């Protein structure tokens, strides 16, 4: 028995010891900090006898602090013995357990019959492969594969924004399509909220005034795990081919050094906006340059979404590991750009990307009312967005 199996055994033991508890509370497991309006809506929908607890990963301390200021109980957690001793007993009081990601400890949880475990996920669509569709999963040990499937099987329902995403989950996790709930992603509501967009644009203008009055080109590639990101040859020249534009680079935080190097190559056209999130910057972006990132699904919902460019310089390699959805190239809203020359030509052309079919496929129910529907389903009332 390895360390992971021992840990899951301890989770199973503690959850069984606490299995007699009355299920009244609501628990939210937070690893992504951009679903706070939904969490607040859940807090408002609680019955007097219920309590909401948000267990958050340490990197989401700032988001948790915002919730704490509004009186919501927040608890940091790691997968350690302390969580087994103090966290599992609280989770075992949950009538509803919301998850925004894959949480390995669920594979050991003794799932009470009266508890509904709901997967909210953190992306409206899927470009990268995951679960059983990830080519590396087949190379893992039999015990690893059993642990993975145990987690997938624990989710009673999956909240999705479109049938296409439901099909992805059903295939990747080997779970019934009947578990998919076509309610829309609560975290997408703000993108359809004109007031939020207006307020966010004002924030961008205040914190990054150099963007005002210019075409904004945002380069936001996905995080390549275990890979040192090296800007492809000619990337800086392609991104700055429109001399009137301003360019913002948003790489994963662990790639800060590479981001700085790329920004240096961009010269006077670069605008450093570290204090703004990628989502906030999307509200002023005319041209989004990305690759396999789920940021594309968010951008396509915004009224300013003009051109969406998929710059896939490492496509053959990425198809092998971590893998991509098999039909990825079929439903892209425009052709894939394979090198910097292609990218430069697309930026110069500045054609509007027709996102109609793209949104019909992935954002069917991401209409700004998802929070209301999700709260109504799991709490019997209508939530409000903020």
Image (cartoon, rainbow, N blue to C red):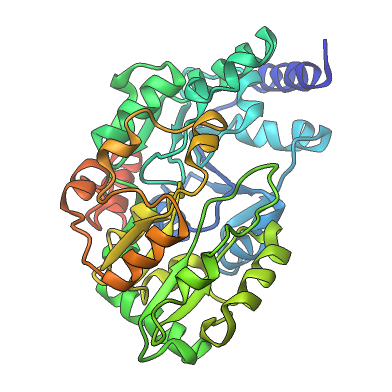
| Image quadrant assignment for residue 298 | bottom left
Q: Would you say residue 230 is visible in this rendering? A: yes
Q: Residue at x 37, y 54 (%)?
A: 296
Quarter of the image with the N terminus in it: top right
Question: Number of callouts in the render?
Answer: 0
Q: Residue at x 36, y 77 (%)?
A: 284
**272 and 310: which one is in front?**
310
Measuring from the top left, give residue 267's x and y in whole percent.
Answer: 59, 83
Please tell me which residue is depicted at 26% across the width and 51% down the height of the picture: 334
Q: Tell me: residue 92, above or below residue 19.
A: below
Is residue 385 shown to the viewer in this render?
A: no
Considering depth in this image, is 378 or 21 the residue closer to the camera?
Answer: 378
Residue 353 position within the rendered picture, expressed as x and y whole percent measured from the top left: 22, 60
Q: Nearer the viewer, residue 178 or 81?
A: 178
- What is the quadrant of the C terminus in the image? bottom left
Q: x, y percentage for residue 371?
A: 32, 52
For the point 45% across and 35% down, the residue is: 119
Report the side of 72 relative to 229 (left or right).
Answer: left
Q: Is residue 8 depicted above or below 96 in this figure?
A: above
Residue nearest the observer in this picture, 173 or 333: 333
Q: Does residue 256 lie above or below 128 as drawn? A: below
Give the x, y percent position of residue 210.
48, 91
Q: Is residue 182 left or right of residue 188?
A: left
């Amino acid at each position: 028995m390895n360390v992971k199996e021992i840990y899951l055994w301890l989770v199973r033991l503690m959850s069984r010891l606490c299995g007699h508890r009355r299920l009244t509370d609501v628990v939210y497991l937070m690893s992504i900090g951009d679903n706070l309006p939904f969490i607040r809506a859940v807090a408002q929908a609680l019955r007097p006898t219920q309590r909401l607890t948000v267990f958050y990963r340490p990197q989401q301390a700032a988001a948790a602090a915002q919730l704490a200021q509004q009186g919501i109980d927040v608890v940091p957690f790691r997968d350690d013995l302390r969580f087994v001793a103090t966290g599992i007993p609280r989770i075992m009081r949950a009538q509803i357990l919301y998850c925004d990601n894959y949480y390995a400890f669920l594979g050991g949880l003794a799932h009470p019959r009266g508890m509904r475990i709901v997967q909210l996920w953190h992306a409206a669509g899927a470009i990268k492969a995951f679960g059983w569709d990830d080519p590396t999963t087949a190379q893992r040990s039999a015990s690893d594969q059993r642990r993975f499937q145990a987690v997938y099987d624990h989710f009673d329902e999956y909240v999705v924004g479109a049938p296409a995403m439901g099909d992805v989950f059903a295939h990747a996790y080997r779970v019934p399509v009947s578990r998919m709930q076509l309610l829309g992603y609560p975290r997408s509501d703000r993108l359809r909220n004109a007031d939020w967009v207006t307020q966010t644009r004002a924030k961008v203008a205040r914190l990054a005034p150099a963007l005002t009055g210019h075409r904004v080109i945002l380069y936001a590639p996905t995080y390549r795990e275990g890979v040192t990101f090296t800007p492809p040859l000619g990337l800086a020249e392609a991104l700055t081919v429109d001399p009137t534009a301003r360019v913002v680079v948003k790489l994963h935080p662990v790639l800060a050094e590479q981001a700085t190097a790329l920004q240096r190559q961009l010269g006077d056209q670069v605008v450093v906006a570290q204090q703004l999130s990628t989502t906030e910057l999307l509200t002023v972006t005319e041209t989004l340059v990305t690759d396999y990132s789920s940021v594309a699904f968010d951008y396509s919902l915004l009224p300013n979404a003009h051109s969406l460019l998929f710059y896939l310089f490492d496509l053959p390699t990425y198809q092998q590991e971590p893998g991509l959805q098999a039909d990825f190239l079929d439903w892209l809203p425009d052709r894939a750009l394979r090198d910097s020359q292609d990218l430069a030509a697309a930026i110069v052309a500045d054609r509007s990307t027709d996102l109609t079919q793209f949104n019909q496929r992935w954002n069917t129910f991401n209409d700004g009312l998802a929070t209301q529907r999700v709260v109504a389903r799991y709490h019997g009332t209508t939530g409000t967005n903020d």
